[in-house]
Image: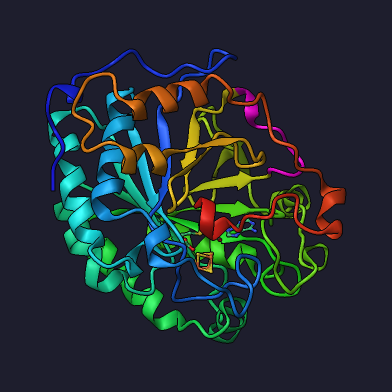
Amino acid sequence: MSFDGPSALAAPPLVDPFGRSVTYVRVSVTDRCDLRCAYCMAEHMSFLPKRDILSLEELDRLCTAFIRLGTTKIRLTGGEPLVRKGFMDLVSSLSRHLRSGALKELTITTNGVQLEAYAEGLARAGIRRINVSVDSLDPDIFSAVTRGGDLKRVLSGLKAAKAAGLAVKINTVALKGWNEETLPDLIAWAHAEGFAITLIETMPLGEVEEDRTDRFVSLRAVRERLESFWRLEDLALRTGGPARYVRIAETGGLLGFITPLTHSFCESCNRVRVTCTGKLYLCLGQDDGADLRAALRGAADDTAPDTALDAIIREAISRKPKGHDFAPERLSTGPALARHMSMTGG
Ligand code: SAM
Ligand code: SF4
């Protein structure tokens, strides 16, 4: 599976109307998942029919088009990327762009459930860093948040990732009544394991059973609490995303805060997202986008330098909005956007 050709030559990079270069694409490879985290999915989610989902070849062509247009970082996500059949074939195929130097980083976000079996293969394909979501180290709470997940499997996955030499960042959604009280323990654990960790505020994406206001924890309050016993040193480190990083002097580890509701991070945004159905979203908090699946399925191949796909991507980027439209008061009035995070990709 490979779509190199003249089109692999770099075209002028994508720059949006606000002068931001779009160099980072998150691609959801499936809407399915082997967990049902309460803040992310409804318990009885209905998933999309297979024909609506991009094939592995289409995903490869799509990623290759972005790389041609100057993307240097791709994150494969979901749903749960490791449940996608043939996922490793896609990773292996895309790794050619790492070897050519066009792509600087290929990475994934996973829930870690199946990581034990995949860690070594990911490292062999040139993946250096991965994000693994862990909301609690208490097996019962983990099971409650994920509706039945087995923490032991995630911990085995993390062990395998370490053994394979993968750098790990833990993602943790701060949740009232579930992990709010134990966040310092989770941070201390991550740092002792040599992992960075990022705390995330819940975002109003997609209908779930719970009222998210009940679970919302302000990370400003969490930070204040952490500062009562740790020294948090602000870092200049910017990833073009919503995370702000500190180093904890006592643990030596990195801690990120993702606060989309209480903090605007849009001015340095360098990213777009593509759903598993090929819908390009220009902003996590806005509905505007473009249908790339039609372009992918309309053309026999995309090896010509100036393809329909490239043109659609370019045109869409010219509409990238200045910023998102989340607001804390919208948490209790239903989702700000109808799509779930598992569609758009985290
Ligand atoms: N299944 C993988 C995982 O859980 O890491 C990848 C996809 S998941 C949608 C990506 C990230 O989004 C996870 O860290 C998850 O905790 C986060 N997430 C999902 N729904 C969210 C929401 N409504 N608000 C904030 N974060 C959310
Ligand atoms: Fe699945 Fe990830 Fe959503 Fe949890 S956060 S339900 S693991 S996609």
- Vertically, is 259 above or below 42? above
Does the magenta run of residues contain 281?
no
Q: Residue at x 43, y 27 (%)?
A: 312
Task: Specify whether 323 is left or right of 320.
Answer: right
Q: How far from the left and from the top, in percent, is residue 34? A: 44, 76
Q: Residue at x 27, y 72 (%)?
A: 116
Q: Dividing the picture into quarters, in which one does residue 245 lie?
A: top right
Q: In percent of the image, x 82 and y 48: which residue is there?
A: 328
Task: Describe residue 130's horizontal placement relative to residue 218 as left or right.
Answer: left
Q: Measured from the top left, where is residue 127 in percent x and y?
A: 24, 48
Q: Position of residue 210 (x, y in %)?
A: 76, 72
> Looking at the picture, does residue 314 appear above or below residue 199?
above
On screen, residue 320 versus residue 87, left or right, reads: right
325 left or right, relative to 134? right
Q: Nearer the viewer, residue 314 or 139?
A: 314
Given residues 316 and 22, the one toward you in this image is 316
Say which of 46 and 130 sits in front: 46
Rendered residue at 28%/36% (across/down): 299
Read off the magenta span. Answer: 260-267
Q: Is residue 128 visible?
A: no
Residue situated in front as seen by the camera: 135 or 251: 135
1 w.r.t. 105: above or below: below
